[in-house]
Image (cartoon, rainbow, N blue to C red):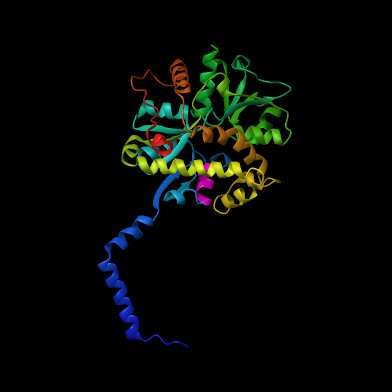
Amino acid sequence: MKTIHRRHLLQGSLALAGSAVLSPALTRHALAQAPQKIRYLTPFGFIFGFSEVLYGQTGGFFAKQGLDVDVEGGRGSAMAVQQVTAGNTLISRTGGTDLIKAYAKDPSIVAVGECYQKDIFYIISHADKPIKSPMDMAGKTIGIVSNGGATENLLDMMLVSKNVPIADVRREVVGNAPTAFEFIKLGRIDAFMATNDTLFALQTDKQPVSAFSADEFAPSPGQVYMVSKKALEAQTETIAKFMRGGHAAIGDMIEKRANLLPVIESMTKVFDLSEARRPDKGVSILANAITTTFEPPFRDKFASKPGPWESAYDLMVKAKIITPLNDRGFYNDKARSLAFG
């Protein structure tokens, strides 16, 4: 057995200390290799619809960009806006209409990329008594996710798009889950608004649903990455790295579409995803999300078109959700252009 004498240990320690003193370049190199910590806040909890960030973290795609992303689950768009505005989180995600509404109050925030290219909400009704357009809603009760939130705003926008009086439609808060369909069966509501993932879960479970996208009558930007204008100026490169990491994660999921279990297992080691507790481990839901949610923004590298912003703004003014604005700088392409050229 080899014995290490105290004198030799001390000499070795001094040599190491001396090398650190004599080689500041090595110290700088080590610091440069340390990942940059940033915070990302989801709009609400953890679901497969946010997989580009969840898998971006657990699959090491952000790490390859030199980022250590702390992913936290939010509790609604209002919280996301507040945290970004206050500087407590660098990046969050919200609906385009939510961003416009928040911008009307405080134009210090801005969208920097579109991660889902149409509004995520659908109007779901029973196939035996379908609600197929805003004109069918007069005198009916429509379920919404929350009072004053994105679904209620979209409901008002759809109604004014077809000149249906807003007061003619009753609202009831039912949340965003497949279980809300039971309220339709009980006759408490005539339809409800929920995300594309909720609709797909109902269709997978063979529920007798009829549905249409809110985008058919109220075209709007979908889900967008949101930062503060101050952060965009100070950390453009960091935001660009974040988008490159998320884009790479989507690309990997697309390549692994034939066998998504490893992707799901990677995410569930860190995040509690209720969809993964389904009999098929959530494979069908993630596969659907890849096709309907992630492939278009992957193809377009998170680009956002001006038309939906203009449509959403006009309908929000008409519905009196916001007052007319002189400043409509809702979107800035600076970081995305840096990320992808």
Figure quadrant of residue 136? top right
**How many numbered discs?**
0
Closer to us: 307 or 254: 254
Image quadrant occupied by the C terminus = top left
On the image, the x and y values in percent for residue 206 come to 74, 33
Residue 140 in the image: above or below residue 260: above
Residue 253 shows in this picture = yes
- Name above or below for residue 187 compared with residue 242: above
Q: Nearer the viewer, residue 194 or 336?
A: 336
Q: Position of residue 127 (x, y in %)?
A: 72, 24
Task: Determine the main secondary structure of the stretch shown in magenta.
Answer: helix
Residue closest to the eye, 7 or 312: 7
Spot occupied by residue 174 in the image (x, y as percentages of width and height): 59, 32
In this picture, which residue range is highlighted in magenta? 52-59
Give the residue at x 41% y 51%: 66
> Residue at image x 65%, y 49%?
261
Q: Is residue 7 left or right of residue 206?
A: left
| Extreme-top residue of the structure | 163
Q: Position of residue 115 (x, y in %)?
A: 50, 34
Question: Visible in this render: residue 175?
Answer: no
Q: Residue furthest left?
A: 22
222 vs 254, left or right, is left
Residue sitting at 60 percent across and 38 percent down?
290
- The answer to whether residue 203 is magenta is no
Can you name the residue that lies furthest to the front here? Answer: 341
| Above or below, comparing residue 270 to residue 151 in the picture | below
Q: Nearer the viewer, residue 191 or 42?
A: 42
